[in-house]
Image (cartoon, rainbow, N blue to C red):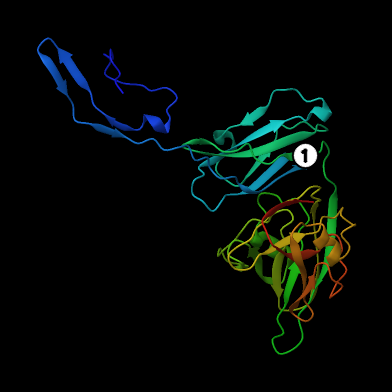
């Protein structure tokens, strides 16, 4: 392909496509003749959008609207931008408010302190990298009211038998503050020596020894934790109730276990079968029996080992395919 008549020292190609790839040669011509440069090779790769962030959530707090997310395992995401709109059902305008990566920063949470009270919003978190923007992201509706403060009281026990371990599984149906970590949660409960979470991508536990800086992690709405105690105790913890919680349930080349907390308003999920039936592709729902320090699993679709479930309970669910679950 010839590009005759170009006389500038720079060639600009608008709307670059893979077809523009190849060898480019500059030909200089005057009355004495023509001279060609060495070829310059141009390779054009198609745009690969950055992957979506994981476990996005948006909840209203006294400070505004708190948004949290997990960065994808891929390193192809540099930052995120957040798009806020008002739904048409609330008389929303066509315009949107965009919080740029400079506004959001490079953490895994952001507080929209400009959100007006008593106004419904829809938020979307979009990944960004050097190549451009990713998909617009999952819609995260936020009701125009401050969530109520709720409490949970749980008896932490030490199992009987030869091991006498004190592992207890605690659901977390609240909206945590950005500062709430495994360390501060364990200290607030008192008498806890380890706080652990389940890592579904690696299908294993990640434990934080309380009183150290090792493997400390942020608490997340709806994500339960294991705590270990050496002596029985009763604990009470509280927070603003999460009205809508989204879980990214995944599968791996090993097992497909994920953890969830039953929201405080979902009293209809009152049994393992009811929980499993509400999750497409879920084949097993399991709970931790702290008194016997072992798991109890219910095969969904059967009557075997079906157990009662209460709001705020933590559960393991096994799925056959990845799914975004919103409760």
- Quadrant assignment, res 184: bottom right
- Quadrant assignment, res 82: top right
Q: Residue furthest front?
A: 1
Q: Nearer the viewer, residue 96 or 323?
A: 323
Point out residue 231 in the picture as x, y percentages from the top left corner: 75, 79
Q: Residue at x 85, y 54 (%)?
A: 150
Q: Residue furthest bottom?
A: 162
Check the picture and name the quadrant holding the N terminus.
top left
Q: Which residue is mark 1?
A: 142
Point out residue 102 in the picture as x, y percentages from the top left corner: 54, 34
Q: Residue at x 52, y 44 (%)?
A: 77
The residue tagged with tag 1: helix, strand or loop? strand
Relative side of 77 to 199, left or right: left
Q: Nearer the viewer, residue 190 or 52?
A: 52
Point out residue 100 in the picture as x, y percentages from the top left corner: 58, 32
- Quadrant assignment, res 276: bottom right
Query: Is 102 above or below relative to 68?
Result: above
Can residue 63 be seen at all in this image of the molecule? no
Relative side of 303 to 280, left or right: right
Query: Is 58 above or below relative to 256?
Result: above
Query: Is 160 above or below relative to 42?
Result: below
Q: Residues within 10 Å of mark 1 (few under 14, many from 20)?
A: many
Q: Residue at x 22, y 31 (%)?
A: 39
Q: How many marks?
A: 1
Query: Is 156 above or below relative to 327?
Result: below
Can residue 72 be seen at all in this image of the molecule? yes
Q: Nearer the viewer, residue 194 or 254?
A: 254
Relative side of 111 to 127, left or right: right
Q: Residue furthest top?
A: 31
């Amino acid at each position: 392909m010839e590009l005759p008549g170009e006389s500038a020292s720079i060639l600009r190609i608008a709307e670059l496509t893979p077809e523009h790839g190849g060898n480019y040669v500059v030909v200089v011509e005057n009355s004495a003749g023509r001279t060609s440069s060495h070829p310059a090779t141009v390779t054009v790769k198609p745009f690969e959008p950055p992957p979506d962030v994981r476990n996005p959530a948006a909840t209203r707090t006294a400070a505004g609207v708190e948004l949290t997310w997990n960065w994808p395992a891929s390193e192809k995401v540099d930052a995120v931008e957040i798009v806020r709109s008002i739904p048409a059902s609330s008389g929303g305008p066509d315009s949107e408010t965009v919080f740029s990566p400079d506004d959001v920063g490079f953490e895994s949470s952001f507080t929209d302190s400009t959100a007006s009270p008593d106004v419904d919003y829809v938020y979307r978190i979009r990944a960004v990298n050097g190549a451009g923007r990713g998909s617009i992201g999952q819609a995260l509706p936020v009701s125009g009211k401050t969530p109520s403060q709720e409490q949970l009281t749980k008896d932490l026990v030490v199992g009987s038998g030869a091991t006498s371990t004190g592992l207890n599984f605690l659901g977390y149906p609240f909206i945590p503050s950005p500062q709430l970590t495994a360390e501060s949660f364990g200290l607030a409960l008192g008498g806890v020596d380890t706080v652990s979470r389940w890592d579904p991508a690696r299908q294993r536990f990640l434990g934080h020894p309380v009183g150290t800086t090792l493997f400390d992690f942020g608490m997340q709405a709806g994500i339960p934790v294991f705590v270990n105690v050496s002596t029985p105790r009763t604990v009470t913890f509280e927070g603003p109730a999460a009205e809508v919680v989204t879980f990214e349930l995944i599968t791996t080349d090993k097992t497909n276990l994920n953890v969830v907390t039953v929201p405080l308003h979902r009293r209809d999920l009152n049994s393992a079968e009811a929980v499993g039936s509400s999750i497409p592709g879920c084949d097993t729902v399991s709970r931790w029996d702290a008194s016997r320090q072992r798991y109890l699993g219910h095969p969904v679709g059967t009557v075997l080992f079906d157990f009662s479930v209460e709001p705020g309970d933590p559960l393991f669910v096994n799925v056959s395919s990845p799914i975004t679950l919103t409760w």
